[in-house]
Image (spheres, rainbow, N blue to C red):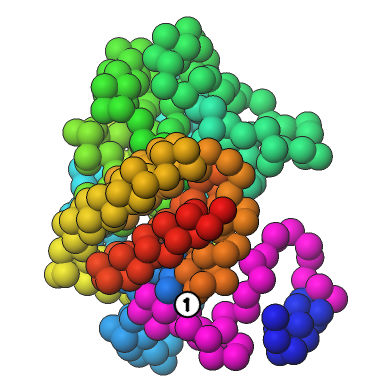
Amino acid sequence: MSEAFDALKAREQASVMNTYGRYPLAVASAKGCRLYDLDGREYIDLLAGIAVCNLGHCREEIAETVAAKARELVHVSNLFYQREQVELAEAMKATCHAGKVFFCNSGAEANEGAIKLARRYMRTVKNRDAYEIITLSGSFHGRTLATLTATGQDKIKFGFAPLPEGFVTVPAGDIAAMEAAMGDKTAAVLLECIQGEGGVKPFPKEYLQAVAKLCRDRDVLFMVDEVQTGMCRTGKFWSFQNYGLEPDVFTCSKALANGLPMGAVLATDAVAEGFVPGSHATTFGGGALVAAAATRTIAIMNDDRLAERAARMGDFAMALFEDVKSQFPDKIEAVRGLGLMLGIGLTFPGGDVWKELLNRGFVLNLTQDKVLRLLPPLVIEQEDLKRFAAALADVLGKL
């Protein structure tokens, strides 16, 4: 570490609450698929701000849109009609089957909004006192009190009791357990088609379709968390489109405005009737500046066919990583994922491997202690993926 890094770290520790286990890296600037530290060292970014900068860092078109809008209209609140917000809603609807959109500021807020919508829809539209939300073990839905309760990982819940009532977690992949958990009080099922924080675990198509059918048969809402998987990440605009699904409600955030804070809840017209004026709100959600950035982001994704590119590059990366796995079958347990949402499951705790890859200039994530998680910008080039695979093989070979 350099003197500049040590000085910044000391200032951070003196001023910022200690809630993050930060990497030993301070990022000074970024462009495309590259990060640069305080001393100008270059890193290949295979994380994209945790699936956020899908277009790459500091994309010129987004920077131009933000700069222009900042001189025209930044914020007036949701007391007013705003052209930019309507244009974004229309652009989002064009990517899917949803009929209405609610805008917020983060993934946790989006999932919180979906939970509120499900409960209110059941009580005010369906006239049923159904409020329970069923989620899956290994899931991650956010860190508000409601969304961390919905999350199927006990480690993030320590110290926050009493937690809100009305949530049931069932074993992931077990349709019988899902069916047994459903009752008169069940309002919705909330799941990720591919669990990200849970270790990059895609569910089988048959399981997801069975859950959706069970929801229809029981008149329960089927809700999908697309916060990490959405916005072309998995080879389709939305991950559920890989499975032929049409959820009643789904959520997104992260890549929606390519780095600016924004989230959304999308629902069918019928379910959206659960909200009326005054039932849910946010001061900043869907403001003109972030909405304009998000609309431009979607346009670029469509024009550049980034969903199709993510599928191709994901196949390319999977082949590379499977080759590394064949060289080290005792060290790599599995390679899994979809599109450019990729996980390399090690047979041992991966902290030392992750640290050495960072030392060699590759930024990625380690989740669940043993899974190297890659969420690169969707504009990543094959050469960068090849360089990473070669480095990984070299690191594993020297263990």
Q: Could one spot residue 181 in this view of the protein?
A: yes
Badge count:
1
Quick one: which residue is furthest to the right in this view?
A: 14
The residue sitting at 15% across, 64% down in the picture is: 305
Instruction: Tell me residue 27's x, y (percent).
Output: 57, 80
Instruction: Identify the image quadrant of the N terminus.
Output: bottom right
Which contiguous range is marked in magenta?
13-42
The residue sitting at 18% across, 56% down in the picture is: 312
- Tell me if residue 358 comes above or below residue 366 in the rendering: below
Secondary structure under tag 1 reads: strand
Q: Could one spot residue 233 in this view of the protein?
A: no
User: Along the horizontal axis of the image, is 367 left or right of 312?
Assistant: right
- Tell me if residue 183 comes above or below residue 332 in the rendering: above
Where residue 70 sits, quadrant-wise, is: bottom left
Where residue 193 sits, quadrant-wise, is: top left
Q: Amino acid at mark 1?
A: Tyr
User: Along the horizontal axis of the image, is 307 left or right of 51?
Assistant: left
- Tell me if residue 266 comes above or below residue 394 in the rendering: above
In the picture of the structure, the residue carrying the numbered disc 1 is 43
Instruction: Tell me residue 301's x, y (percent).
Output: 22, 66
The residue sitting at 48% across, 55% down in the picture is: 397
- Tell me if residue 279 comes above or below residue 68 in the rendering: above
Magenta span contains residue 307: no
The residue sitting at 54% across, 33% down in the picture is: 138
User: Along the horizontal axis of the image, is 261 left or right of 220?
Assistant: right
> How crowded is the residue under tag 1: few (<14 C-alpha within 10 Å), some, or many (20+)?
some
Quick one: which residue is furthest to the front in this view?
A: 398
Instruction: Tell me residue 172's x, y (percent).
Output: 47, 24
Instruction: Tell me residue 241's x, y (percent).
Output: 22, 41
